Amino acid sequence: MAKTTILEFRAKKPDPTIAICARHDDRPDALLEILHDLQDDVGHVPEASLPLIAKALNLSRAEVYGVVTFYHDYHMKPQARHVIKICAAEACQSMGSRALIALAEKLTRGKKVKIEKTYCLGLCAQSPSMMVNGKVMARVDAKKFKSVLAGLT
Amino acid sequence: MIKIYIPRDSSAKAVGADALAEAIANHAKAKKISIQIIRNSSRGLAFAETFVEVETPKGRVGYGPVDVKDVKGLFASGFHEGRKHKLCHGLVEQIPYLKNQERLTFARAGITDPVSLTDYTAHGGFEGLRKALTIIGADIVKEVTDSGLRGRGGAAFPTGIKWKTVHDAKSDQKYICCNADEGDSGTFADRMVMEGDPFMLIEGMTIAGIAVGASKGYVYIRSEYPDAIATMKDAIGIATADNWLGDHIQHTDKSFSLEVRRGAGAYICGEETAMLESLEGKRGMVRPKPPIPALEGLFGKPTVINNVLSFAAVPFILAKGSKAYADFGMGRSRGTLPFQLAGNIKRGGLVEKAFGVSIRTLINDFGGGTATGKKFRAAQIGGPLGSYVSAEQLDLVMDYETMAANGAMVGHGGIVVFDTTVDMAAQARFAMEFCAIESCGKCTPCRIGSTRGLEVIDKITANDNRSENLQLLEDLCQTMTDGSLCAMGGLTPMPVMSAVKLFPEDFGMKKQSKKAAE
């Protein structure tokens, strides 16, 4: 009997933009929430989504673009697999975050990990602090940072 | 069944509380010890997180900071029966750090499960709202006015006057907005309220809604606070299901609904008008005032905008009366402020005290001095737009007027401590850099002044026409102070000029001798 080959056709994931806008009732005031949801889903805010959002919310494309580029959280390009946000504000500075950031940038050069500066994670009594893929960590020193980095694949 | 409390606050989770809870559960199971783990709010003893409490007949006994590796040893010493261990702090109520505070807003901190309505009502929750539901709006406003409560976000504007303006405005729709964009470094009290006692914020905002006749509220929470966002959303769902939010609250004719909105990493959205723009789905650009938001705020409607701590103070004021609140404090600063000890400090955490406490008491008696053990050099008070203070100023007391008279500010009550390794020129430079990064760009003094300021500071430290450039920096700061639309550009000169004045040696100048200064 001839061997059958099963070919799997994986359907391309449909663009979630329209559905996300609809989930927020196409409300223009919910634009930030819509962009957050889109970024959580896709990983970034694709340029192709901007006209779709603009149409759904009855805004101009420039208005949507203006919002995406104003806020630090939104990215229009795909991000690194891992993002580590290290607090660079005063409380963490007082506990050596400048040196920690320098070390982090050195250790992650050429790796799939992006180091970003953030300004306060609200853990100022346990500085320095950082956020690894959305999870907060406090009392971070070089040793702790290295062990966290080693755990990221 | 032994009750063991492990905080779910992010100050505990950030140092491994989730793994710890699992380790304790597993160890107890293996040893056949029957325990119940309750994920409570944090006491605010950040230095002792993860702070684990065990219920005993004498009261709760605390241990901390507990790490997963300590679990075996703790059980071996009988910590589950409240016995001694090197991490033991004794009876929690007797810990001096907590005992010496005046906790009105944070009365439930560490005691309750944040999302348990049963816990909340068992510890005085909704007493203020129950009262508010029985009186007219104008009387609620009067109670808040009489308490002397002033905006806890930093601007210290009398809350009652703001509410009265919105109350008296005629409109088909009014809004209540909570500014939970706590972006100031050194502050975390808002986060602790939202993660640890979310019903209190809901109660405070609902009282505001009833007082001024607003049926809709928004909590604008920064995206850097994912746990606060999740907890607030949960709590709003629970409160709505139990008819503490929504239509006909507790079968009265009052209705109020609440929605959480996430920020997106823009510091400027902590400025109230930029926050309104953001809530409307726009770029967070500052609006010129007037019109004031109390008359033309969200979607052009009369809007109460208060900080988390301002709303959080209201349930107590309604429940116990304005006098009970106003009895605390000094001068025109009534009540208590949850101070936040942060940065290079041995015992960092939340210290709620009546106004009038000295900086020295907070940093030394509560905080225990620097974390590194080196000498204290400077503290920044009131966030990144607050002044630096020197060792000579530690006896200043925390009261809005006293601080202002001395060129400093209370702000949101955050205190960031630095030891002698700090380079104050670098701190001044950072203040300008931060302003350049976070400026919304609407007004010139802030947008361009911050970048020019950064360059001028670099010239000063490089000894490039130092004295002329110092004069230039001073002029520039004056322009920013006088010409900026909001506090971002208007107050950035505070940390910059205080650093120059108090620590001239870090900018390559001679330190003024005390006599010359006099």
Image (cartoon, coloured by chain):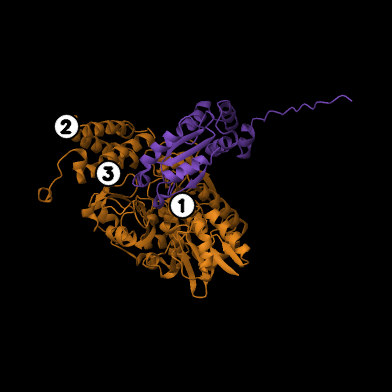
Chain colours: A purple, B orange
> What chain does mark 2 sit on?
B
Depth check: give the residue in front, B366 or B247: B366
Residue B206 in view (yes/no): no
Do residues under tags 2 and 1 come within 8 Å of each other at their CB atoms?
no
Q: Which is more N-terminal, label 1 or label 2?
A: 1
Q: Which residue is found at the position 46% from the left and 70% from the top? A: B84
Gap between marks 3 and 2 measured at Cα: 20 Å
For the residue carrying disc 3, how many other residues have a C-alpha within 10 Å: few (<14), some (14-19), or many (20+)? many
> What chain does mark 1 sit on?
B
Residue carrying label 1: B191
Residue carrying label 3: B494
x and y, in percent, of residue B278 in the image: 47, 39
Q: Amino acid at mark 3?
A: Met
For the residue carrying disc 1, how many other residues have a C-alpha within 10 Å: few (<14), some (14-19), or many (20+)? many
On the same chain, marks 2 and 1? The answer is yes
Q: Which residue is found at the position 31% from the left and 34% from the top? A: B450
Q: Secondary structure at mark 3?
A: helix
From the viewer's perspective, tell me whether residue A4 is left or right of residue B271: right
Classify residue A20 by image quadrant. top right
Do residues under tags 3 and 2 come within 8 Å of each other at their CB atoms?
no
Q: Which residue is found at the position 37% from the left and 38% from the top? A: B288
x and y, in percent, of residue B251 in the image: 61, 62
Residue carrying label 2: B468
Depth check: give the residue in front, B285 or B4: B4
Gap between marks 3 and 1 measured at Cα: 25 Å
